[in-house]
Amino acid sequence: MSKIGLQSRSLALRILQEAKNKFGKELLDEHLCQSSLSGKDRNLVTELVQGIIRRHKTLDALIQTYSKHEPEDIVRTVLWLGLYQLLFMDKIPSYAACNTSLELLQEKRMFHAKGYVHAILQRVFREARLCTKVTEQSCTLPIDEAKAWLFPKPVFPDPKENQVAYWSAVYSCPEALAQAWQQAFGEAVARQLLIAMNQSPSLYLRPRIPLQTAIAEWNSFKIPVEVTQHGLLKLPHGVDFSEFTSRIQNRYQIIGHFAFQVVQMMNPQPNTKILDICAAPGTKTMAIADAMQGTGQIIACDISQPRLQLLRQIMETYGNSITIQEQDATQIPSAWYGQFDQVLADVPCSNSAVFAKRPDARWRFNKTNLLALQQIQSTILAQAALALRHDGILIYSTCSIEAEENQDVIQKFLKIYPNFGIIEEKRELPLLPYCDGGSAFKLKKINK
């Protein structure tokens, strides 16, 4: 294995060790910015880190089955890296997955663990069989709807006795999440959602230049792009966008597939006054500003200083049409009451519609957190309503598909504020091929 290949895995190990149970994408980005790795190796680090954050519960079930004792913390992480490459990365040769794991232990001077790790990886490699008939059994690990790993003995809970426990283990998520989706969407759709959240997400770009010019530009880079029905460009999986940053400058914006639909639902008009009440990191704000063609006024606020700094960096090209302000959205200034044509309340949420690109968020999913978020969301929505003028438009949106954070919040709001009515609502489940979704409600303030 090349020195670069080992460096990539060593960096992934360092990030995972540093993250523990508090992984955030910012940590990954920080380490990648400081590294001198190529785009290909940066992609490998990203896939390893995010993939293991997604799949570590499944990997732990395998370790528990194939190990006679609990491994040390760093040894467990090395096993995660080796097993993830063996089972979930079909472009990594098995010898590379095994050899680099042993080299990592050598690098960390964990000589005593090399035989232990080698034995587990070799045994899993010998015993696991890839099959194209996916049936739910305690010895099967589904990869997607078309294939699964088959083991010679039970590794996971028996799905006939407890399907939720089986799903939790093989799809690597809290039981509360598997149960919530089973109850809300039924068995077939819940399974599709669980499969989709474990896929590596695609990258979507919003062209800030004519669409045909954008397509021609990416063709000149020899990168084929797919145009979505909403006019975004979908890049092929594995493309390192950072390699093109200097060449494309400010002509494109990375934005979520559903996030752009929220802006389209708003339909921002020139010469209007808009409040983006939870704006950072600013992807929707930027799209709104483009739609307004530099006219009117946008106030973009957030409570987080670090996130506001990211927003300021993004907005440097927009001049005075955007005012960025630190503000707690649960208590807006009275000077804002009745002042805005539109208010966007893209509230903090469980992120259940973007687990594919926020793999850490699934581990915070539980009923207690949902109800705590609901209180914050309801408070922000009520404050957003105060900022609207008569006949104004209020957009409530989340990166969530949970009723507690969407329909329940809206229904409670309408009971308290009968002078609002729903004029449009949208929910997109994060299924393949996009693995990205969310919920949004367009409300109008009227006199009654």
Image (cartoon, rainbow, N blue to C red):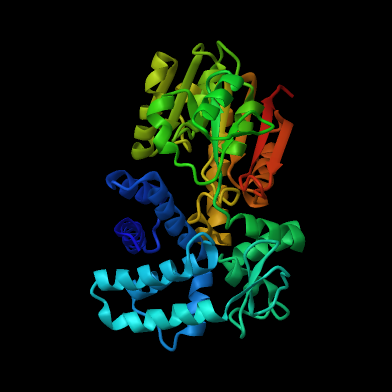
- As drawn, the residue found furthest toward the left would be 109
Looking at the image, which is closer to me, 203 or 226?
226
- Whether 266 is drawn above or below 228: the answer is above
Q: Quadrant of residue 291?
A: top right
- Whether 23 is drawn above or below 114: the answer is above
Please indicate whether residue 260 sits to the left or right of residue 64 in the image: right
Residue at the (42%, 58%) spot, across then down: 49
Looking at the image, which is closer to me, 349 or 12?
12
Q: Quadrant of the N terminus?
A: bottom left
Looking at the image, which is closer to me, 171 or 175?
171
Please indicate whether residue 277 sits to the left or right of residue 304 in the image: right
Q: Quadrant of the C terminus?
A: top right
How many numbered marks are there?
A: 0
Residue at the (71%, 69%) spot, across then down: 134
Q: Quadrant of residue 386?
A: top right
- Whether 276 is drawn above or below 76: the answer is above
- Whether 207 is drawn above or below 67: the answer is above
Q: Position of residue 432 (x, y in %)?
A: 67, 49
Q: Position of residue 385 (x, y in %)?
A: 59, 30
Please indicate whether residue 429 sits to the left or right of residue 41 in the image: right
Residue at the (57%, 58%) spot, across then down: 198
Q: Position of residue 395 (x, y in %)?
A: 62, 31
Q: Quadrant of residue 398?
A: top right
Q: Is residue 136 visible?
A: yes
Q: Position of residue 107 (x, y in %)?
A: 25, 69
Residue at the (51%, 65%) spot, across then down: 55
Q: Is residue 276 visible?
A: no
Looking at the image, which is closer to me, 216 or 17?
216
